[in-house]
Each structure stands twice: as structure tokens, then as C-alpha cells.
């Protein structure tokens, strides 16, 4: 019995140590700490953050008010409709013209977890096509992004999708932003958004 208690205590301590250093970027109640860019819809529903196409069917972004350079970002997303979205890192924006690097969140076989440079070089790296099946269509997915200087690594549902070392990315700093793609008909839910500076 004592052995099992020690094991349980060890698990609790390990879990606590893992949680240390992480902070939540979304409080489950409102958009405090974030800024909306554009006319697309961003709102909270049942403790989840929702992005949805508006009548303009344009690009829209929700950016953190703080900048982050080196970090591990964990979040969950569920694509309820088209699902063409993304997570921008080390970015800045003018209106809805965003400059930075997008970790793609898209429908099946459209490179979720890949890295795209907005208003720059375009696609820098796409996942191996065989790994794209990791996306759970219509279900919750876990996305992790690790940014350490020029090295960016992404994971989807525990599977490493891409890894890149890029001097231009390494020199940048800026906010994190969620995207809603133009074209209309898009709806994506987000939750458990947390970050750890490294």
C-alpha cells in the first residue's frame, strides 16, 4: 500500500513540476489579453474561444497583447466548419496585413503543422504527407509549437510534424495570433491555450 501511495505522490509532483512555468493565455470567460484585428467574429462560448467568418468573409486575427520570442505553446483546436486557420508567432500587423510565421491549421491534407511566412517567402516547410493523417477531423486536436531562437518545431497530437532552423525567424520577435482565413464558411474552436517561456 505504501508503495502505491509513493507512486501516486510521485505522479502528482511530476505533474506539478510540468505545470510550473506555464501560464494560460485564455481565461475561458472573455478576450482579456487579446486584440481583435478585422471584422470577423471572435467570441467565447461554453468556456471555449471561437473564431467564425463574418459577413465580410475576410481575413481576421486575434493577437496577444504581449510579445513572445522563445516559448513552448500548447493549445487545442476543433474545426467545426472549413477550419482554415492558423497560429502566428513572432508577428506584427497593420490592419489585417500580418507579417510573421504561421503554423498552419487547415482541413485534412492541407499541411496542418507546416510553417508559412506571411508576406514573405511563403511555405518554408510542409509536413510529410503521411503524417497529415494525424489530424482528427471534427474532433479536438492538440497542437504544440516550440520556438527557440531560429529553431521552430511543431507537433500535432503528439506527432512531430516539422522542424526548421531559420536565421530570419531567429531574429524576429512579436505577438502570437490566431487566424481566420478569408473566403467565409469557417468556424474553429480553441481551448487550453497555455505558454511557457524558455
Image (tube, helix red, strand yellow):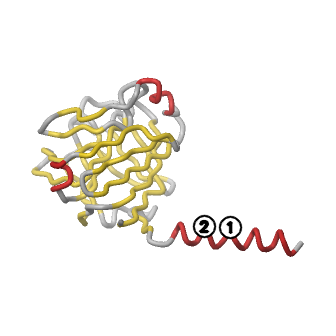
Q: Is residue 178 above or below residue 2?
A: above
Q: Are marks 2 and 1 in contact (CB under 8 Å)?
A: yes
Q: CA distance from mark 2 to mark 1?
A: 6 Å
Where is residue 149, by image quadrant? Answer: bottom left
Give the residue number, with chain letter if any, for mark 1: 11
Q: Residue at image x 50%, y 27%?
A: 133
Residue 86 position within the rendered picture, expressed as x and y whole percent measured from the top left: 32, 42
Q: Is residue 182 above or below residue 145?
A: above
Q: Residues within 10 Å of mark 1 (few under 14, many from 20)?
A: few
Q: Residue at image x 17%, y 40%?
A: 118
Q: Is residue 90 above or below residue 112?
A: below
Give the residue number, with chain letter if any, for mark 2: 15
Residue at the far left in the pictured view? 94
Indicate the secondary structure of the residue bearing disc 2: helix
Indicate the secondary structure of the residue bearing disc 1: helix
Left or right, residue 20 beside residue 63: right
Can you say which quadrant of the picture contains the N terminus? Answer: bottom right
Amino acid at each position: 500500500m505504501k508503495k502505491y501511495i509513493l507512486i501516486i505522490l510521485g505522479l502528482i509532483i511530476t505533474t506539478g513540476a510540468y505545470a510550473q512555468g506555464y501560464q494560460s493565455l485564455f481565461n475561458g470567460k472573455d478576450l482579456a489579453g487579446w486584440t481583435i484585428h478585422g471584422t470577423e467574429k471572435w467570441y467565447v462560448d461554453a468556456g471555449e474561444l471561437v473564431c467564425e467568418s463574418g459577413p465580410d468573409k475576410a481575413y481576421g486575427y486575434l493577437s496577444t497583447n504581449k510579445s513572445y520570442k522563445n516559448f513552448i505553446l500548447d493549445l487545442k483546436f476543433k474545426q467545426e466548419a472549413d477550419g482554415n486557420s492558423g497560429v502566428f508567432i513572432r508577428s506584427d500587423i497593420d490592419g489585417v496585413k500580418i507579417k510573421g510565421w504561421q503554423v498552419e491549421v487547415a482541413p485534412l491534407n492541407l499541411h496542418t503543422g507546416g510553417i508559412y511566412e506571411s508576406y514573405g517567402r511563403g511555405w518554408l516547410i510542409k509536413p510529410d504527407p503521411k503524417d497529415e493523417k494525424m489530424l482528427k477531423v471534427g474532433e479536438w486536436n492538440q497542437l504544440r509549437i516550440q520556438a527557440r531562437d531560429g529553431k521552430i518545431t511543431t507537433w500535432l497530437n503528439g506527432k512531430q510534424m516539422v522542424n526548421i532552423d531559420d536565421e530570419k525567424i531567429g531574429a524576429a520577435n512579436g505577438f502570437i495570433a490566431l487566424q481566420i482565413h478569408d473566403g467565409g464558411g469557417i468556424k474553429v474552436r480553441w481551448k487550453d491555450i497555455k505558454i511557457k517561456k524558455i
